[in-house]
Image: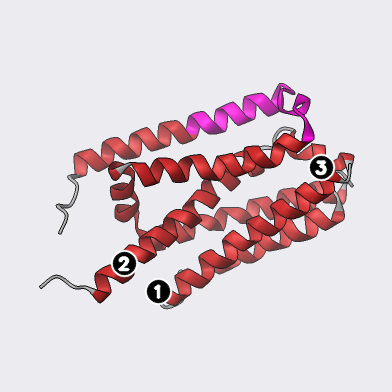
Amino acid sequence: MQEPPKRPQLATTKCEVLTNVATWGAVVAAASASGVLAKLPARLVAPLIIGGIALPTIAYARSSALKALARDVGIHKLSLFHTWRVAGTAAFLFYGSKDELPPPFVRNAAWGDLATSILAGALIVLPQRHSTYVAFHLFGLSDFIAALATGLSLTLRGDARMRTIVTFPLALIPLFGVGLSGAAHLIAFDLLRDRRIEQSDPDP
């Protein structure tokens, strides 16, 4: 059995994570507000979004300190984090109402985010079962995949309205929030796997 990490070590790791996350958000905000992101080829947006999910996940997989922090936070709080996605719903509906985003993208992204945020909030009162968390994170991740696939398809078909996705402040959702939430889903699966292993193989 691994020795639990000391609280000062967890506090240090948490500080580093918060600093990196704040820096990431600030960079996306500055790049979108200054128009730098708008100058990038449209086809690079999807790889940037995927990279935003992959890099934190890889960092987690390679860091025992990040794994310890995730275990300390726990699957329940990590799941409740996704309630923020109601903000994504509001943003997508707002830009969609002004015809600045394509209707198919708004339908998939906005309503998928709304459903995910409602389900995340429901976890406060639902029984904390392994199967419930698995179902929730599968749904939340599939929502991202559907929205990304729809956005990429519309971009490749030349819908100019998809360029709105890299303007400030909307860019903070796909290039910051999606990365955090996508990584949180994948980390949650790892926590659930570990918990299942611990339950099936208890300490003597």
- Can you say which quadrant of the picture contains the C terminus? bottom left
The answer to which of marks 3 and 1 sits earlier in the sequence is 1
Q: What residue is pinned by disc 1?
A: 130
Question: Looking at numbered disc 3 in the image, what kind of residue is underneath it?
Answer: Met
Question: Dot 3: what SS?
Answer: helix
Picture residue at 20% right of the left edge, 39% below the top: 8
The answer to which of marks 2 and 1 sits earlier in the sequence is 1
Q: Is residue 16 above or below residue 118?
A: above
Question: Looking at numbered disc 2 in the image, what kind of residue is underneath it?
Answer: Arg
* Residue 113, visible in the rendered structure: no
Mark 2 vs 3: CB contact within 8 A: no
Picture residue at 57% right of the left edge, 40% below the top: 51
Picture residue at 69% right of the left edge, 42% below the top: 46
The answer to which of marks 2 and 3 sits earlier in the sequence is 3
On residue 195, the disc is 2
Q: Is residue 185 above or below residue 115?
A: above
Question: Dot 1: what SS?
Answer: helix
Can you tell which quarter of the image residue 199 is in? bottom left
Residue range corresponding to the magenta coloring: 22-42
Q: What residue is pinned by disc 3?
A: 162
